[in-house]
Image (cartoon, helix red, strand yellow):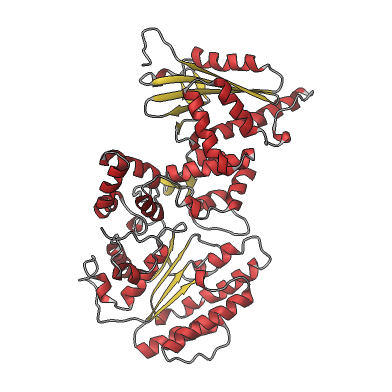
Amino acid sequence: MKKLPIGIQSFEDLRSNDYLYVDKTEDIYRLVTSSKVVFLSRPRRFGKSLLVSTLEELYTSNQSLFEGLYIYDKWDWTRRYPVIRIDWAGIKHGSKEEMEADMSDYLQSIATVNDIKLTRRFASGRFSELIELLHRKKNNKVVVLIDEYDKPILDAIGKPEAAEIRAFLQEFYVILKSADDHLKFVFMTGVTKVTKVSIFSALNSLEDITLDEGYASICGYTQEELERDFSEYIDNTAVHLMQTKASLLDDIRNWYDGYSWDGKTPVYNPVSTLLFFKMKEFSNYWFDTGTPTFLINRLKKHGLAKTVLEPIVAGQTAFNSYDPDELEDIPLLFQTGYLTIKNKQRVGKSPQYTLEVPNMEVKESLMEYLLSAYTNYPLSKMSALGQQMLKQILAFDAEGFTNNMRIMLADVPYTLLPSKAQDKAEAEAENLASEAFYHNIFQMWMTMLGFNIQSERMTNRGRIDAVLQQERVAIVVELKFHATTKLDTLLNQAIAQIRENRYYEPFLDRKIILLGIAFSGKDVGCRIEQLSEPGFSQD
């Protein structure tokens, strides 16, 4: 078997050292023969750097690396283009002065290799000069590849130097417009499309292919590619996990597939897929490589748990731009990979998008982080506690479940709990706020455990608070909140409401558990019952 290219971002290294490569050169060939100035946004660790490296080797005519690939017999290998490749991950960008110095030195190093003397003082001038002189010296137009163009901006969010860093980049990138006559191809990658860097308005010919269905799978693996190129790994992993091939493929799809930029073409997260086949264990590989704390805190602060728990609908403007000074939640979650396009349709002349969390890896991890943030329960213990509580529901252990509920919620700030306010309007407002707070917590908790949750499911008899579904089990949940009503009364009401409204009827093909959870003042309790209908067996 070919080696798994974990952490490999160099196309030359990958192809020269017998690593597995999923051939993306058909997409690349179509791109380079039909476009000139291109921008592509994808989340972190999604193969952007490998794509840039592949383009570099293509334009420098490193023919042997492409043998056996789609593009091999279609490219003119006699033409060798000068390439300027800029990767902001490797250039200092802590301040404008630091960027100016390090970028100037980097451009000078390229000039020195090509026996070119640069005379201009500042980095932007040197960039312009280098492009023009390379064109003249090599007698071929220049290819410019910029990886992580927005990294300096994202790293500076909230810092005093943010504005001057953006000003430097604006001055630097606009050079590409004036240098157009000397350029063969320009390709830029990033996580975001930042509004306050003028390249997107200054470069009139720039083509943003982020949502272009023709390039929906240029990064990531399609189902066909997974089953074709990883077939040996799939077979070996199925044996290791004692699963059939079909059931393993279903599990891999649920965990790591589901990213889409056109609503039609789902792709697998490459880093998660590779690490899964290496470790032969389902885990949260991509999520754990760098989910920013500020994102979790923002979701909590703005009450956005519902945003990532249920599908949301957005228009085209949600994808047009990203303002680091005035962060908007939906573009932020989409561009960073925590939401993806599940469906696209036209409403009138405008596209409308349905966004959801991509897959189980992101959903489970995001819920775990959010639940810890909401309850202040340690993140490292959250998963184990949740699994224990699930077992208690399935074993009808109401006492154990209630005790763990109290443990999980012990550190919820006092101000978020319902009080016994004297004023009726105030009490009602507090009750509604507490209900929303705890409803969010339970949605997150249930989603974290891998259930297919249908919050507030409508039936012909009423609205179910939540249904947790697994293959052979349905848990119908009703939550009750009140500051002054006794716990037993609330629990009786919860179970009675499920039974009287027959909320369980859509799930009679499986074992049904009725779960009532109640909050009375600062206390919490639960009741767990198994449905027993005349003539209906739950065996």
x, y percent for residue 277: 34, 51
Is residue 44 at least partly visible in the picture? yes
Is residue 208 at least partly visible in the picture? no
x, y percent for residue 41: 45, 60
For residue 287, side relative to residue 219 (left or right): right
Residue positioned most to the front: 240
x, y percent for residue 406: 63, 29
x, y percent for residue 110: 45, 84
Question: In which quadrant of the rendered image does the C terminus lie?
Answer: top left
Q: Which residue is depicted at the point 42% across and 87% down?
A: 113
For residue 480, side relative to residue 16 (left or right): right
Of 210 and 440, which appears nearest the observer? 440
Q: Quadrant of residue 8?
A: bottom left
Question: In which quadrant of the rendered image does the N terminus lie?
Answer: bottom left
For residue 463, side relative to residue 164 (left or right): left
Q: Which residue is depicted at the point 55% across and 88% down?
A: 120
